[in-house]
């Protein structure tokens, strides 16, 4: 649940953050080890004012600034991969077989979760597999130290300071001891990687042992994940992603996750199911998702796909998770598309972003990653230059931009 840390705080933690971001807990400068201990002392005082027990606050006594966490935060590169690169690695035959086996093994738990929250087993299992390989790789970073380091760092303190408070509240609630709180480097915990604030809000004691244990208890993990996805607006008995085939002469500017049309709209344009059969001529809202442009794989993304994007804002990750869930639900392997696709390197994407900005197009951060902001800028540039506006950059577009 890597990018979800930026989507806000829950259970009133956001209100508490206004205090934790002020006064002595907010240093004039941040980053690096200098000043960390002083800041943490101020944080402890303000956590006490928010009702956190002295016992929980004492868990911060041995926490130190961890420069390795900062290096990992700055060095994320996985989402520079294309959809086919990322999905072929993450949706392996082994994961598909393991996921299918686990759906059978925990069928009664999954049935209960779907009855209560409306979320099918395939969707929960896809996140379970992608996040921790079904609980096998949950991470071993000390959670409090990781979050405290990121809370002190200048880059995203407003995201992580409430999470540090939530982690202490988890200790107070009895869901985990400080020693048990070990997980991913950015502070995620458990088999589907919940940030502490989400753990507080959505964790469910499904096995009835009196604790919400997202590290060891599979029933708790499945129910909590279903509860969380339902909170994001999952629509019961509705699809999420469907692979399609597209003709070569579509109005490509109509594609994109920010544009919806009735499914009949796409059917009239010649879009078919992956097996070549016609799409239903109905009004189900859908977006044409082209993760690698008009020549690559194509999907219809339905309203439930927005839940995947809320889990993780990376379109590559979200499409991969939704595709994984579709495979577990019976869909076949994805097709490579209509023609070979040239994937720009991270360095070329940086050049593209720089050229787009120079010509007045917004791209978000110039980071070599093809995020949604960059793709929106690409689409506008393609329209300007009379190129197919599928929001996916090509060497031709890069050359046009370089030439001014």
Image: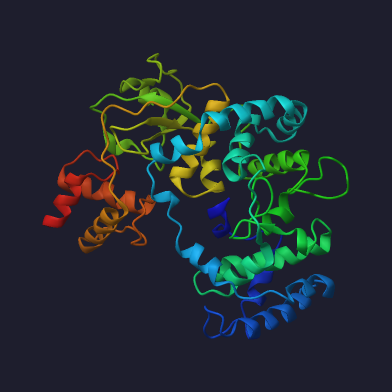
Location of residue 103 (image quadrant): top right
Q: Position of residue 166 (x, y in %)?
A: 71, 64
Examine the rendered structure and indicate whether residue 217 appears above or below residue 43: above
Q: Nearer the viewer, residue 348 or 379?
A: 348
In the image, what residue occupies the spot 54% across and 74% down? 153
Q: Residue furthest left?
A: 403
Side of 129 relative to 11 (left or right): left
Q: Nearer the viewer, residue 126 or 372?
A: 126
Examine the rendered structure and indicate whether residue 101 appears above or below residue 275: below
Evaluate whether residue 196 shows in this view: yes
Q: Position of residue 236 (x, y in %)?
A: 63, 31
Evaluate whether residue 303 shows in this view: no
Q: Position of residue 7 (x, y in %)?
A: 56, 57
Q: Quadrant of the C terminus?
A: bottom left
Question: Disc count in the image?
Answer: 0
For the rendered model, the colour scheme is: rainbow
In the image, what residue occupies the spot 49% across and 42% down? 318
Q: Position of residue 184 (x, y in %)?
A: 61, 56
Examine the rendered structure and indicate whether residue 103 appears above or below residue 65: above
Location of residue 274 (image quadrant): top left
Side of 192 relative to 319 (left or right): right
In the image, what residue occupies the spot 87% across and 42% down? 208
Side of 310 relative to 40 (left or right): left
In the image, what residue occupies the spot 52% across and 35% down? 322
Q: Residue furthest right?
A: 209
């Amino acid at each position: 649940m890597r990018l979800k840390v930026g989507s806000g705080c829950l259970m009133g933690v956001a209100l508490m953050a206004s205090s934790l971001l002020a006064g002595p807990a907010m240093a004039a400068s941040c980053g690096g080890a200098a000043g960390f201990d002083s800041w943490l002392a101020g944080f402890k005082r303000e956590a006490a004012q928010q009702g956190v027990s002295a016992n929980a606050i004492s868990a911060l006594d041995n926490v130190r600034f961890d420069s390795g966490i900062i290096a990992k935060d700055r060095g994320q590169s996985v989402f520079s991969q294309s959809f086919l690169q990322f999905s072929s690695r993450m949706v392996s035959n082994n994961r598909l077989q393991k996921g299918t086996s686990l759906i059978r093994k925990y069928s009664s738990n999954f049935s209960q979760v779907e009855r209560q929250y409306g979320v099918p087993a395939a969707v929960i299992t896809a996140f379970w597999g992608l996040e921790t390989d079904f609980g096998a790789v949950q991470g071993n970073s000390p959670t409090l130290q990781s979050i405290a380091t990121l809370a002190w760092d200048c880059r995203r303190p407003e995201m992580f300071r409430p999470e540090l408070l939530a982690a202490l509240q988890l200790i107070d609630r009895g869901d985990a001891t400080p020693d048990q709180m070990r997980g991913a480097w950015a502070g995620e915990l458990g088999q589907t990687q919940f940030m502490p604030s989400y753990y507080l809000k959505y964790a469910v004691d499904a096995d009835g042992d009196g604790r919400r244990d997202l590290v060891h208890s599979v029933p708790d993990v499945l129910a909590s994940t279903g509860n969380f996805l339902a909170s994001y607006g999952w629509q019961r008995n509705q699809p999420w992603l469907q692979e399609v085939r597209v003709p070569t002469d579509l109005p490509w500017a109509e594609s994109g996750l920010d544009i919806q049309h009735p499914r009949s709209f796409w059917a009239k344009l010649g879009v078919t199911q992956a097996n070549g059969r016609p799409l239903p001529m109905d009004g189900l809202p859908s977006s044409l998702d082209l993760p690698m442009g008009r020549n690559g794989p194509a999907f219809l993304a339905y309203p439930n796909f927005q839940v995947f994007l809320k889990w993780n804002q990376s379109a590559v990750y979200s499409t991969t998770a939704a595709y994984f869930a579709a495979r577990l639900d019976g869909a076949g392997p994805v097709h490579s598309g209509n023609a070979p696709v040239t994937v720009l390197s991270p360095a070329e994407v940086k050049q593209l972003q720089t050229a787009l900005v120079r010509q007045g197009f917004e791209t978000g951060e110039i980071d070599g990653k093809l995020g949604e902001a960059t793709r929106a800028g690409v689409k506008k540039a393609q329209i300007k230059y009379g190129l197919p506006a599928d929001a996916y950059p090509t060497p031709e577009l890069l050359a046009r931009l370089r030439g001014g």
